[in-house]
Amino acid sequence: MVTVIPDVKVKVNEFIIQWLSQDKVFDQLSDDLSCILNGKVPDVVPTKLINNRSLSPPHHKHPASPRSSPRVPGSPNRASAARTKSNRTPSPAHEIKKSSPSISNKLKRPQEIIPQFYFPMGKPSTPPQRVDDSRLSKIKDLFEECKDGLMAPRDFGSVTKAAELPLYWKCPLFEACSSSDTCSYQQFLQVYEYLDSHCHDEASKFLRVLTKGSRSHIIWEDFNNLIQDVIDTHPGMSFLDDAPEFHARYIETVTGRIMYTVNRSWSSKITITELRESNFLKILASLEDEPDINQVSDYFSYEHFYVIYCKFWEIDTDHDLIVSLDDVMRHADGTVNPRALERLFEGTVTYNKTETLTYFDFIRFLLAEEDKSHPTAIEYWFRIMDLDGDGFISLFELEYFYQAQLEKMRLLGVEECSVLDCVCQALDLVRPKEETKITLTDIKKCKQPSLFFNIFLNIQKFLDHELKDPFSNKDGEVPLTDWEKFAAREYEDLIADEELNKQYEYEDDFEEEDEEIPMMGNVVAKSAVETYGK
Ligand SMILES: [Ca+2]
Ligand SMILES: [Ca+2]
Protein backbone atom coordinates (compact mmCIF):
# COMPACT_ATOMS: atom_id res chain seq x y z
CA MET A 1 0.00 0.00 0.00
CA VAL A 2 1.27 3.42 -0.76
CA THR A 3 2.08 5.11 2.52
CA VAL A 4 1.55 8.81 2.81
CA ILE A 5 4.98 10.07 3.89
CA PRO A 6 4.86 13.42 5.67
CA ASP A 7 7.17 16.11 4.35
CA VAL A 8 9.34 16.54 7.44
CA LYS A 9 10.77 19.90 6.36
CA VAL A 10 7.33 21.37 5.80
CA LYS A 11 6.12 19.99 9.13
CA VAL A 12 9.12 21.38 11.02
CA ASN A 13 8.61 24.78 9.38
CA GLU A 14 4.96 24.62 10.39
CA PHE A 15 5.94 23.94 14.03
CA ILE A 16 8.45 26.80 13.99
CA ILE A 17 5.87 29.22 12.60
CA GLN A 18 3.38 27.96 15.17
CA TRP A 19 5.99 28.49 17.92
CA LEU A 20 6.96 31.94 16.68
CA SER A 21 3.35 33.02 16.50
CA GLN A 22 2.76 32.40 20.22
CA ASP A 23 2.34 35.69 22.06
CA LYS A 24 4.85 34.76 24.77
CA VAL A 25 7.53 33.84 22.26
CA PHE A 26 6.89 36.93 20.20
CA ASP A 27 7.11 39.20 23.28
CA GLN A 28 10.29 37.52 24.51
CA LEU A 29 11.99 37.78 21.13
CA SER A 30 10.94 41.45 20.86
CA ASP A 31 12.41 42.13 24.33
CA ASP A 32 15.65 40.34 23.42
CA LEU A 33 15.91 42.29 20.21
CA SER A 34 15.38 45.57 22.08
CA CYS A 35 18.16 44.54 24.52
CA ILE A 36 20.54 43.83 21.66
CA LEU A 37 19.68 47.11 19.94
CA ASN A 38 20.35 48.93 23.23
CA GLY A 39 23.74 47.24 23.50
CA LYS A 40 22.66 44.88 26.29
CA VAL A 41 22.94 41.10 26.46
CA PRO A 42 19.54 39.39 26.50
CA ASP A 43 18.62 37.28 29.48
CA VAL A 44 19.67 33.66 28.98
CA VAL A 45 16.55 32.50 30.82
CA PRO A 46 13.65 33.58 28.66
CA THR A 47 11.26 35.12 31.12
CA LYS A 48 8.11 34.60 29.15
CA LEU A 49 8.94 31.11 28.05
CA ILE A 50 10.05 29.68 31.33
CA ASN A 51 6.79 27.91 32.05
CA ASN A 52 6.19 26.79 28.53
CA ARG A 53 6.98 23.11 28.78
CA SER A 54 6.16 22.41 25.18
CA LEU A 55 9.29 24.30 24.19
CA SER A 56 11.65 22.05 26.14
CA PRO A 57 14.84 21.39 24.22
CA PRO A 58 15.49 17.98 22.71
CA HIS A 59 17.94 16.94 25.45
CA HIS A 60 14.94 16.22 27.73
CA LYS A 61 14.66 12.50 27.52
CA HIS A 62 11.10 12.57 28.85
CA PRO A 63 9.56 15.80 27.64
CA ALA A 64 6.09 14.73 28.79
CA SER A 65 7.22 14.01 32.34
CA PRO A 66 5.56 16.48 34.69
CA ARG A 67 8.47 16.22 37.13
CA SER A 68 11.21 17.30 34.74
CA SER A 69 12.60 20.72 35.48
CA PRO A 70 11.83 23.45 33.06
CA ARG A 71 14.99 24.18 31.12
CA VAL A 72 16.06 27.03 28.94
CA PRO A 73 15.90 26.37 25.23
CA GLY A 74 19.65 25.94 24.90
CA SER A 75 22.54 24.03 26.37
CA PRO A 76 22.33 23.62 30.16
CA ASN A 77 26.10 24.18 30.33
CA ARG A 78 25.68 27.52 28.73
CA ALA A 79 23.10 28.48 31.34
CA SER A 80 25.30 27.42 34.27
CA ALA A 81 28.29 29.21 32.73
CA ALA A 82 26.20 32.34 32.48
CA ARG A 83 25.14 32.00 36.11
CA THR A 84 28.76 31.61 37.28
CA LYS A 85 29.80 34.59 35.25
CA SER A 86 26.99 36.75 36.60
CA ASN A 87 28.05 35.95 40.19
CA ARG A 88 31.53 37.30 39.58
CA THR A 89 30.87 40.29 37.40
CA PRO A 90 27.60 42.15 37.40
CA SER A 91 26.48 42.28 33.83
CA PRO A 92 23.61 43.98 32.01
CA ALA A 93 21.94 40.60 31.93
CA HIS A 94 22.25 40.37 35.69
CA GLU A 95 20.59 43.77 35.97
CA ILE A 96 17.76 42.63 33.80
CA LYS A 97 17.35 39.55 35.95
CA LYS A 98 17.14 41.65 39.05
CA SER A 99 14.56 43.90 37.46
CA SER A 100 12.54 40.93 36.38
CA PRO A 101 10.85 39.51 39.49
CA SER A 102 8.75 37.14 37.47
CA ILE A 103 11.76 34.85 36.86
CA SER A 104 12.59 34.27 40.49
CA ASN A 105 8.92 33.97 41.37
CA LYS A 106 8.40 31.44 38.69
CA LEU A 107 11.51 29.49 39.63
CA LYS A 108 10.40 29.38 43.26
CA ARG A 109 6.87 28.36 42.44
CA PRO A 110 6.25 24.71 43.41
CA GLN A 111 6.23 22.62 40.29
CA GLU A 112 2.86 21.90 38.92
CA ILE A 113 2.25 18.18 38.56
CA ILE A 114 0.27 17.36 35.48
CA PRO A 115 -1.65 14.14 35.96
CA GLN A 116 -0.95 11.43 33.40
CA PHE A 117 -3.40 11.81 30.55
CA TYR A 118 -2.03 9.41 27.93
CA PHE A 119 -2.59 5.72 28.48
CA PRO A 120 -1.34 3.75 25.47
CA MET A 121 -2.34 0.45 27.06
CA GLY A 122 -5.68 1.69 28.36
CA LYS A 123 -6.46 3.55 31.58
CA PRO A 124 -5.90 1.41 34.69
CA SER A 125 -8.86 1.12 37.01
CA THR A 126 -8.62 2.89 40.35
CA PRO A 127 -8.22 1.32 42.80
CA PRO A 128 -6.32 -1.39 40.87
CA GLN A 129 -8.35 -4.57 40.53
CA ARG A 130 -6.64 -7.80 41.35
CA VAL A 131 -7.30 -10.99 39.43
CA ASP A 132 -10.23 -12.71 41.02
CA ASP A 133 -8.87 -15.72 42.95
CA SER A 134 -12.04 -17.74 42.42
CA ARG A 135 -11.71 -17.18 38.67
CA LEU A 136 -8.12 -18.42 38.74
CA SER A 137 -9.01 -21.48 40.79
CA LYS A 138 -11.77 -22.29 38.28
CA ILE A 139 -9.25 -22.03 35.44
CA LYS A 140 -6.77 -24.16 37.38
CA ASP A 141 -9.44 -26.83 37.80
CA LEU A 142 -9.96 -26.87 34.03
CA PHE A 143 -6.25 -27.57 33.49
CA GLU A 144 -6.23 -30.24 36.20
CA GLU A 145 -9.00 -32.09 34.43
CA CYS A 146 -6.65 -32.55 31.43
CA LYS A 147 -4.12 -35.36 31.14
CA ASP A 148 -0.88 -34.31 32.91
CA GLY A 149 -2.45 -30.87 33.41
CA LEU A 150 -1.73 -30.04 29.77
CA MET A 151 -4.52 -28.55 27.67
CA ALA A 152 -4.93 -28.95 23.92
CA PRO A 153 -5.99 -26.02 21.70
CA ARG A 154 -9.43 -27.55 21.04
CA ASP A 155 -10.28 -27.28 24.76
CA PHE A 156 -9.02 -23.74 25.17
CA GLY A 157 -12.44 -22.19 24.62
CA SER A 158 -13.42 -23.09 28.19
CA VAL A 159 -10.29 -21.41 29.60
CA THR A 160 -10.88 -18.31 27.45
CA LYS A 161 -14.45 -17.99 28.69
CA ALA A 162 -13.42 -18.70 32.30
CA ALA A 163 -10.89 -15.89 31.89
CA GLU A 164 -13.83 -13.69 30.82
CA LEU A 165 -12.46 -13.06 27.37
CA PRO A 166 -14.41 -13.36 24.09
CA LEU A 167 -14.59 -16.95 22.84
CA TYR A 168 -12.83 -16.43 19.51
CA TRP A 169 -9.74 -15.11 21.24
CA LYS A 170 -9.08 -18.77 22.15
CA CYS A 171 -6.71 -19.62 19.31
CA PRO A 172 -4.44 -16.55 19.59
CA LEU A 173 -4.60 -16.80 23.39
CA PHE A 174 -3.41 -20.41 23.25
CA GLU A 175 -0.61 -19.45 20.88
CA ALA A 176 0.40 -16.53 23.10
CA CYS A 177 0.71 -18.96 26.02
CA SER A 178 2.40 -21.90 24.35
CA SER A 179 4.41 -22.57 21.21
CA SER A 180 3.85 -26.33 21.43
CA ASP A 181 0.62 -28.29 20.97
CA THR A 182 -0.28 -28.22 24.65
CA CYS A 183 -0.42 -25.54 27.32
CA SER A 184 0.12 -25.78 31.08
CA TYR A 185 -1.60 -23.70 33.78
CA GLN A 186 1.71 -21.96 34.56
CA GLN A 187 2.15 -20.94 30.92
CA PHE A 188 -1.40 -19.57 30.87
CA LEU A 189 -0.94 -17.78 34.20
CA GLN A 190 2.19 -15.99 33.03
CA VAL A 191 0.34 -14.44 30.07
CA TYR A 192 -2.84 -13.80 32.03
CA GLU A 193 -1.04 -11.98 34.82
CA TYR A 194 0.80 -9.87 32.28
CA LEU A 195 -2.51 -8.93 30.60
CA ASP A 196 -3.99 -8.09 33.96
CA SER A 197 -1.14 -5.88 35.12
CA HIS A 198 -0.07 -4.21 31.86
CA CYS A 199 -3.06 -4.11 29.52
CA HIS A 200 -5.98 -2.11 30.83
CA ASP A 201 -8.50 -2.33 28.04
CA GLU A 202 -9.73 -4.87 25.54
CA ALA A 203 -7.76 -3.42 22.60
CA SER A 204 -4.42 -3.56 24.42
CA LYS A 205 -5.12 -7.10 25.62
CA PHE A 206 -6.04 -8.22 22.11
CA LEU A 207 -2.96 -6.61 20.59
CA ARG A 208 -0.72 -8.31 23.17
CA VAL A 209 -2.40 -11.68 22.59
CA LEU A 210 -2.51 -11.54 18.78
CA THR A 211 1.08 -10.34 18.34
CA LYS A 212 2.38 -12.43 21.28
CA GLY A 213 3.88 -9.19 22.53
CA SER A 214 6.25 -8.97 19.59
CA ARG A 215 4.90 -5.76 18.04
CA SER A 216 2.96 -2.62 18.83
CA HIS A 217 0.81 -3.08 15.72
CA ILE A 218 -1.06 -5.89 13.97
CA ILE A 219 -0.11 -7.11 10.52
CA TRP A 220 -2.48 -9.07 8.33
CA GLU A 221 -0.76 -12.45 8.81
CA ASP A 222 -1.60 -12.17 12.53
CA PHE A 223 -5.25 -12.90 11.69
CA ASN A 224 -4.62 -16.17 9.82
CA ASN A 225 -4.96 -18.62 12.70
CA LEU A 226 -7.76 -16.70 14.37
CA ILE A 227 -9.88 -16.84 11.20
CA GLN A 228 -8.92 -20.47 10.55
CA ASP A 229 -10.22 -21.22 14.05
CA VAL A 230 -13.51 -19.47 13.19
CA ILE A 231 -13.77 -21.71 10.10
CA ASP A 232 -12.98 -24.80 12.16
CA THR A 233 -15.20 -24.15 15.17
CA HIS A 234 -17.98 -21.65 14.40
CA PRO A 235 -21.29 -23.54 14.02
CA GLY A 236 -22.20 -21.43 10.97
CA MET A 237 -19.06 -22.59 9.14
CA SER A 238 -19.30 -26.34 9.64
CA PHE A 239 -20.53 -26.81 6.04
CA LEU A 240 -17.02 -25.83 4.93
CA ASP A 241 -15.25 -28.69 6.78
CA ASP A 242 -15.07 -30.77 3.62
CA ALA A 243 -13.96 -27.92 1.38
CA PRO A 244 -10.52 -26.87 2.65
CA GLU A 245 -9.86 -25.35 -0.79
CA PHE A 246 -12.09 -22.47 0.27
CA HIS A 247 -10.33 -21.81 3.59
CA ALA A 248 -7.36 -19.76 2.38
CA ARG A 249 -9.57 -17.55 0.21
CA TYR A 250 -12.04 -16.97 3.04
CA ILE A 251 -9.17 -16.05 5.39
CA GLU A 252 -7.73 -13.67 2.80
CA THR A 253 -11.12 -12.07 2.21
CA VAL A 254 -11.89 -11.53 5.89
CA THR A 255 -8.39 -10.13 6.48
CA GLY A 256 -8.73 -7.88 3.42
CA ARG A 257 -11.99 -6.52 4.79
CA ILE A 258 -10.49 -5.97 8.25
CA MET A 259 -7.52 -4.11 6.76
CA TYR A 260 -9.80 -2.06 4.51
CA THR A 261 -12.04 -0.94 7.36
CA VAL A 262 -9.78 -0.83 10.42
CA ASN A 263 -6.40 0.26 9.01
CA ARG A 264 -7.48 3.83 8.34
CA SER A 265 -3.88 5.00 7.91
CA TRP A 266 -3.32 2.74 4.85
CA SER A 267 -0.04 1.56 6.42
CA SER A 268 -0.87 -2.19 6.51
CA LYS A 269 -0.17 -1.96 10.24
CA ILE A 270 -3.18 -1.77 12.54
CA THR A 271 -2.31 0.38 15.54
CA ILE A 272 -3.94 0.14 18.93
CA THR A 273 -5.73 3.44 18.28
CA GLU A 274 -7.16 2.14 14.99
CA LEU A 275 -8.27 -1.00 16.80
CA ARG A 276 -9.98 1.05 19.52
CA GLU A 277 -11.71 3.30 17.02
CA SER A 278 -13.01 0.38 14.94
CA ASN A 279 -15.85 -2.05 15.61
CA PHE A 280 -13.64 -5.09 15.02
CA LEU A 281 -13.43 -6.37 18.61
CA LYS A 282 -17.17 -5.89 19.06
CA ILE A 283 -17.86 -7.87 15.88
CA LEU A 284 -15.38 -10.59 16.87
CA ALA A 285 -17.10 -10.90 20.25
CA SER A 286 -20.52 -11.10 18.56
CA LEU A 287 -19.50 -14.28 16.68
CA GLU A 288 -20.10 -16.42 19.76
CA ASP A 289 -23.72 -15.27 20.08
CA GLU A 290 -24.63 -15.52 16.39
CA PRO A 291 -24.83 -19.03 14.96
CA ASP A 292 -25.55 -17.72 11.45
CA ILE A 293 -22.25 -16.34 10.17
CA ASN A 294 -24.10 -14.47 7.40
CA GLN A 295 -25.76 -12.26 9.98
CA VAL A 296 -22.29 -10.94 10.85
CA SER A 297 -22.10 -8.74 7.79
CA ASP A 298 -18.99 -6.90 8.95
CA TYR A 299 -15.89 -8.87 7.95
CA PHE A 300 -17.06 -12.46 8.50
CA SER A 301 -20.18 -13.04 6.37
CA TYR A 302 -19.69 -16.09 4.19
CA GLU A 303 -22.15 -14.77 1.63
CA HIS A 304 -20.14 -11.61 1.26
CA PHE A 305 -16.99 -13.66 0.83
CA TYR A 306 -18.73 -15.75 -1.78
CA VAL A 307 -19.78 -12.69 -3.78
CA ILE A 308 -16.26 -11.20 -3.73
CA TYR A 309 -14.66 -14.50 -4.65
CA CYS A 310 -17.07 -15.20 -7.50
CA LYS A 311 -16.68 -11.66 -8.88
CA PHE A 312 -12.94 -12.18 -8.97
CA TRP A 313 -13.26 -15.62 -10.50
CA GLU A 314 -15.41 -14.23 -13.30
CA ILE A 315 -12.65 -11.92 -14.52
CA ASP A 316 -9.63 -14.09 -13.63
CA THR A 317 -10.22 -16.31 -16.62
CA ASP A 318 -6.87 -18.13 -16.49
CA HIS A 319 -7.33 -18.65 -12.74
CA ASP A 320 -3.84 -17.78 -11.60
CA LEU A 321 -5.17 -15.49 -8.87
CA ILE A 322 -3.95 -12.32 -10.55
CA VAL A 323 -5.79 -10.05 -12.95
CA SER A 324 -4.58 -7.70 -15.66
CA LEU A 325 -6.04 -4.40 -16.85
CA ASP A 326 -7.89 -6.26 -19.62
CA ASP A 327 -9.42 -8.58 -17.03
CA VAL A 328 -10.54 -5.73 -14.77
CA MET A 329 -12.05 -3.93 -17.78
CA ARG A 330 -14.57 -6.81 -17.97
CA HIS A 331 -15.68 -6.31 -14.37
CA ALA A 332 -19.38 -5.37 -14.03
CA ASP A 333 -19.82 -5.53 -17.82
CA GLY A 334 -17.28 -2.78 -18.31
CA THR A 335 -19.29 -0.09 -16.53
CA VAL A 336 -16.34 1.25 -14.54
CA ASN A 337 -14.49 4.16 -16.16
CA PRO A 338 -11.49 2.65 -18.02
CA ARG A 339 -9.33 5.66 -17.13
CA ALA A 340 -9.99 4.97 -13.44
CA LEU A 341 -9.14 1.30 -13.95
CA GLU A 342 -5.84 2.25 -15.58
CA ARG A 343 -5.03 4.22 -12.43
CA LEU A 344 -5.44 1.05 -10.32
CA PHE A 345 -2.19 -0.17 -11.85
CA GLU A 346 -0.18 2.98 -11.16
CA GLY A 347 0.52 2.29 -7.49
CA THR A 348 -1.79 4.89 -5.99
CA VAL A 349 -4.00 2.38 -4.23
CA THR A 350 -1.80 -0.72 -4.27
CA TYR A 351 1.51 -1.59 -2.63
CA ASN A 352 3.51 -0.94 -5.77
CA LYS A 353 3.10 0.12 -9.35
CA THR A 354 2.30 -3.16 -10.99
CA GLU A 355 1.00 -4.66 -14.20
CA THR A 356 -1.34 -7.01 -12.35
CA LEU A 357 -3.64 -6.94 -9.35
CA THR A 358 -3.79 -9.67 -6.73
CA TYR A 359 -6.95 -11.04 -5.14
CA PHE A 360 -6.20 -8.87 -2.11
CA ASP A 361 -6.08 -5.76 -4.34
CA PHE A 362 -9.34 -6.84 -5.95
CA ILE A 363 -11.08 -7.13 -2.56
CA ARG A 364 -10.23 -3.50 -1.84
CA PHE A 365 -11.26 -2.43 -5.32
CA LEU A 366 -14.64 -4.15 -5.09
CA LEU A 367 -15.40 -2.82 -1.60
CA ALA A 368 -14.48 0.70 -2.72
CA GLU A 369 -16.39 0.39 -5.99
CA GLU A 370 -19.59 -0.84 -4.39
CA ASP A 371 -19.75 1.56 -1.46
CA LYS A 372 -18.18 4.85 -2.40
CA SER A 373 -19.42 6.55 0.76
CA HIS A 374 -17.20 4.43 3.02
CA PRO A 375 -14.34 6.57 4.45
CA THR A 376 -11.71 4.27 2.91
CA ALA A 377 -13.52 4.33 -0.44
CA ILE A 378 -13.55 8.13 -0.45
CA GLU A 379 -9.77 8.12 0.06
CA TYR A 380 -9.39 5.33 -2.51
CA TRP A 381 -11.20 7.17 -5.31
CA PHE A 382 -9.69 10.49 -4.34
CA ARG A 383 -6.22 8.99 -4.84
CA ILE A 384 -7.36 7.60 -8.18
CA MET A 385 -8.76 10.93 -9.39
CA ASP A 386 -5.90 13.10 -8.10
CA LEU A 387 -3.73 12.35 -11.14
CA ASP A 388 -0.79 14.54 -10.16
CA GLY A 389 -0.99 13.73 -6.45
CA ASP A 390 -1.08 17.39 -5.38
CA GLY A 391 -3.88 16.81 -2.86
CA PHE A 392 -6.61 18.38 -5.01
CA ILE A 393 -8.92 17.19 -7.73
CA SER A 394 -8.67 19.95 -10.29
CA LEU A 395 -11.14 20.84 -13.03
CA PHE A 396 -8.70 19.31 -15.50
CA GLU A 397 -8.78 16.03 -13.57
CA LEU A 398 -12.58 16.06 -13.45
CA GLU A 399 -12.70 16.60 -17.20
CA TYR A 400 -10.10 13.88 -17.86
CA PHE A 401 -12.33 11.26 -16.23
CA TYR A 402 -15.56 12.67 -17.60
CA GLN A 403 -14.30 12.43 -21.21
CA ALA A 404 -14.24 8.63 -20.82
CA GLN A 405 -17.76 8.75 -19.37
CA LEU A 406 -18.93 10.62 -22.49
CA GLU A 407 -17.59 7.75 -24.61
CA LYS A 408 -19.64 5.32 -22.53
CA MET A 409 -22.77 7.44 -22.90
CA ARG A 410 -22.37 7.41 -26.67
CA LEU A 411 -22.01 3.61 -26.59
CA LEU A 412 -25.07 3.25 -24.38
CA GLY A 413 -27.00 5.65 -26.59
CA VAL A 414 -28.06 7.79 -23.66
CA GLU A 415 -28.43 11.53 -23.82
CA GLU A 416 -25.05 13.13 -23.22
CA CYS A 417 -24.59 15.63 -20.48
CA SER A 418 -21.95 18.24 -21.34
CA VAL A 419 -18.68 18.44 -19.44
CA LEU A 420 -19.58 21.90 -18.18
CA ASP A 421 -22.99 20.78 -16.87
CA CYS A 422 -21.52 17.76 -15.12
CA VAL A 423 -18.64 19.63 -13.56
CA CYS A 424 -21.10 22.28 -12.32
CA GLN A 425 -23.32 19.55 -10.87
CA ALA A 426 -20.32 17.99 -9.16
CA LEU A 427 -19.18 21.32 -7.72
CA ASP A 428 -22.72 22.01 -6.47
CA LEU A 429 -22.69 18.63 -4.77
CA VAL A 430 -19.32 19.01 -3.08
CA ARG A 431 -19.22 22.78 -2.57
CA PRO A 432 -15.44 22.94 -2.30
CA LYS A 433 -13.86 25.66 -0.18
CA GLU A 434 -11.85 26.77 -3.17
CA GLU A 435 -14.07 26.82 -6.21
CA THR A 436 -11.69 25.15 -8.65
CA LYS A 437 -9.97 22.65 -6.36
CA ILE A 438 -11.69 19.76 -4.59
CA THR A 439 -9.97 18.47 -1.47
CA LEU A 440 -10.43 15.17 0.32
CA THR A 441 -12.07 17.05 3.20
CA ASP A 442 -14.57 18.65 0.79
CA ILE A 443 -15.69 15.21 -0.38
CA LYS A 444 -15.79 13.79 3.14
CA LYS A 445 -18.06 16.64 4.18
CA CYS A 446 -20.29 16.18 1.14
CA LYS A 447 -23.56 14.30 1.76
CA GLN A 448 -23.44 12.21 -1.41
CA PRO A 449 -19.84 11.18 -2.07
CA SER A 450 -21.08 8.13 -4.03
CA LEU A 451 -22.99 10.30 -6.45
CA PHE A 452 -20.03 12.64 -6.90
CA PHE A 453 -17.65 9.77 -7.71
CA ASN A 454 -20.14 7.94 -9.92
CA ILE A 455 -20.56 11.02 -12.13
CA PHE A 456 -16.92 10.52 -13.09
CA LEU A 457 -16.25 6.84 -12.47
CA ASN A 458 -19.30 4.70 -13.19
CA ILE A 459 -21.86 6.00 -15.64
CA GLN A 460 -24.31 3.16 -15.05
CA LYS A 461 -24.44 3.85 -11.34
CA PHE A 462 -24.76 7.56 -12.03
CA LEU A 463 -27.76 6.91 -14.29
CA ASP A 464 -29.28 4.42 -11.83
CA HIS A 465 -28.82 6.41 -8.66
CA GLU A 466 -32.38 7.57 -8.44
CA LEU A 467 -33.98 4.24 -9.30
CA LYS A 468 -35.45 2.33 -6.37
CA ASP A 469 -34.10 -1.16 -5.92
CA PRO A 470 -35.61 -4.10 -3.98
CA PHE A 471 -32.80 -3.88 -1.45
CA SER A 472 -33.36 -0.22 -0.68
CA ASN A 473 -33.75 0.68 2.97
CA LYS A 474 -37.22 0.37 4.44
CA ASP A 475 -38.63 2.55 7.20
CA GLY A 476 -37.89 1.29 10.69
CA GLU A 477 -35.14 -1.10 9.60
CA VAL A 478 -31.44 -0.72 10.28
CA PRO A 479 -30.26 0.90 7.04
CA LEU A 480 -28.11 -1.29 4.82
CA THR A 481 -24.87 0.11 3.46
CA ASP A 482 -24.38 0.26 -0.30
CA TRP A 483 -22.00 -2.67 0.08
CA GLU A 484 -24.55 -4.79 1.96
CA LYS A 485 -27.21 -4.07 -0.68
CA PHE A 486 -24.81 -4.99 -3.47
CA ALA A 487 -23.73 -8.22 -1.73
CA ALA A 488 -27.34 -9.29 -1.04
CA ARG A 489 -28.39 -8.63 -4.64
CA GLU A 490 -25.37 -10.36 -6.15
CA TYR A 491 -25.65 -13.35 -3.83
CA GLU A 492 -29.24 -13.94 -4.91
CA ASP A 493 -28.20 -13.73 -8.56
CA LEU A 494 -25.27 -16.10 -8.08
CA ILE A 495 -27.39 -18.63 -6.24
CA ALA A 496 -30.09 -18.43 -8.94
CA ASP A 497 -27.39 -19.11 -11.56
CA GLU A 498 -26.06 -22.05 -9.57
CA GLU A 499 -29.52 -23.54 -9.19
CA LEU A 500 -29.98 -23.28 -12.94
CA ASN A 501 -26.58 -24.91 -13.58
CA LYS A 502 -27.44 -27.66 -11.15
CA GLN A 503 -30.66 -28.33 -13.02
CA TYR A 504 -28.82 -28.61 -16.34
CA GLU A 505 -26.12 -30.82 -14.85
CA TYR A 506 -28.74 -33.04 -13.24
CA GLU A 507 -30.45 -33.52 -16.56
CA ASP A 508 -27.15 -34.08 -18.41
CA ASP A 509 -25.15 -36.19 -16.01
CA PHE A 510 -26.17 -37.59 -12.62
CA GLU A 511 -22.53 -38.20 -11.63
CA GLU A 512 -21.75 -34.48 -11.69
CA GLU A 513 -23.62 -34.15 -8.40
CA ASP A 514 -20.66 -35.67 -6.54
CA GLU A 515 -18.49 -32.74 -7.59
CA GLU A 516 -20.62 -30.15 -5.92
CA ILE A 517 -20.16 -28.68 -2.50
CA PRO A 518 -23.15 -27.99 -0.29
CA MET A 519 -23.23 -24.39 0.81
CA MET A 520 -25.80 -22.77 3.06
CA GLY A 521 -28.51 -25.06 1.74
CA ASN A 522 -27.57 -24.14 -1.81
CA VAL A 523 -25.12 -25.66 -4.21
CA VAL A 524 -21.89 -24.31 -5.60
CA ALA A 525 -20.13 -25.73 -8.64
CA LYS A 526 -16.95 -27.26 -7.37
CA SER A 527 -15.05 -26.25 -10.48
CA ALA A 528 -14.64 -22.70 -9.22
CA VAL A 529 -13.12 -23.97 -6.01
CA GLU A 530 -10.98 -26.69 -7.50
CA THR A 531 -9.50 -24.41 -10.08
CA TYR A 532 -7.69 -22.31 -7.53
CA GLY A 533 -6.67 -25.22 -5.33
CA LYS A 534 -4.56 -24.09 -2.41
CA1 LIG B 1 -5.33 -14.23 -14.19
CA1 LIG C 1 -4.56 16.96 -8.58
Image (spheres, rainbow, N blue to C red):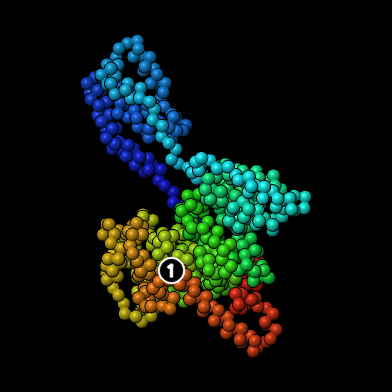
Amino acid under label 1? Val
> Which residue corresponds to the image point at 48% horizontal and 58% vertical from the top-left?
279
Question: Please, is residue 172 above or below residue 460 in the view?
Answer: above
* In front of the other: 137 or 254: 137
Residue 171 in view here:
no
| Residue reaching furthest to the front | 134
| Residue reaching furthest to the right | 148
> Which residue corresponds to the image point at 51% horizontal and 42% vertical from the top-left?
124
Residue 472 in the image, given as x and y percentages of width and height: 41, 75
Question: Please, is residue 111 above or below residue 251 in the view?
Answer: above
* In front of the other: 201 or 453: 201
Question: Please, is residue 164 above or below residue 72 in the view?
Answer: below
In-image side of 60 versus 527 (left or right): left
Res 481 → quadrant: bottom left
Instruction: Kindly identify which residue carries mark 1.
Output: 478
SS for dot 1: loop
Residue 386 in the image, given as x and y percentages of width and height: 38, 59
Res 426 → quadrant: bottom left
Residue 35 in the image, given as x and y percentages of width and height: 24, 22
> Which residue corresponds to the image point at 67% horizontal and 82% vertical from the top-left?
513
> Which residue corresponds to the image point at 63% horizontal and 53% vertical from the top-left?
162
* In front of the other: 248 or 522: 522
Q: Where is the C terminus found, in terms of image quarters? A: bottom right
In-image side of 384 versus 268 (left or right): left
In-image side of 263 versus 15 (left or right): right
Res 396 → quadrant: bottom left
Residue 189 in view here:
yes
Residue 256 in the image, given as x and y percentages of width and height: 53, 61
